[in-house]
Amino acid sequence: MGALITTPISVGLALLSTRPSDVIYWCKWITWLPSTPRESFGIPLTESELLKNVDEIFFYGVNSKSERLIVRLARSTGQEVEALIQLKLCNGKVYQSKEMSGFQQTGCDKKTFSCGGLQLHYLSPMRKWRIFFNGFLKETNEDDTSSDKMVHVKFALIWSATTDVFDFSSDINKKILADGLAKSKWNQYSPPIEKLNSALNCYAQCGVIMGNVNIDGLDEVNLYLFGEKLRFFG
């Protein structure tokens, strides 16, 4: 979790380029950073909101058997979407999507992110999501990634929260962030607060992923993974 918290701070500091002389002065600016209302954390951004922002959701999970799942879906203007799936099972087989892009399905409600055979549906905001996929993925092995074999993969998984939301725009310690800004190199005399806000406009939440994976209609595997959900609004 610490690495996830550090990354947005580092990105934010890299975007800033003025050298203030007083930490308290910059605390004033940081206190005014707006945050996304938490009740809207699960809802896909509207088309008008996508004119200024990219709406991205990211799930990952791992366990002691070296199994892992990575799912990413990003929405932009015009209902355009792109997605990524990578699944590794305990037998060493890796299943991953080629470049997935397209459009959000028109029949989807305001609780669903979709791209091709992938659907991310929130059942309860900040508590439970359904991760569903039905389609073809490239099958490789960790020792041999050159295979072009495509197999049919279907999974229906539930992500359940195990912690509260960590909102980077409001939960980061303001004094520590201000101290970092004061010690950084700046080229101008006013801070680019909009860029800082964009870099920190995301949240993370720990959770577990559980459910079944079916490979080519034959092998069914039960998954139980520990990881996080991240949502980016910048």
Image (tube, helix red, strand yellow):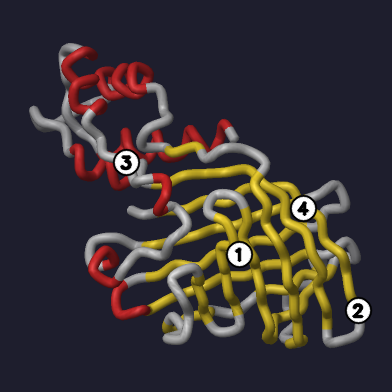
Give the amino acid at mark 3.
Ser
N-terminal-most mark, 1 or 3: 3
N-terminal-most mark, 1 or 4: 1
N-terminal-most mark, 4 or 3: 3
| Figure check: 36 above or below 48 | above
Give the amino acid at mark 2.
Asp
The residue that mark 2 highlights is 219
* 111 sits to left or right of 47: right
The residue that mark 1 highlights is 71
* Residue nearest the observer in this picture, 18 or 42: 42
The residues tagged by marks 1 and 4 sit, at their Cα atoms, a distance apart of 13 Å
Which residue corresponds to the image point at 43% horizontal and 61% vertical from the top-left?
43
| Figure check: 204 above or below 181 | below
The residues tagged by marks 1 and 3 sit, at their Cα atoms, a distance apart of 25 Å
Q: Secondary structure at mark 2?
A: strand
Which residue corresponds to the image point at 42% horizontal and 86% vertical from the top-left?
106
The residues tagged by marks 4 and 3 sit, at their Cα atoms, a distance apart of 30 Å
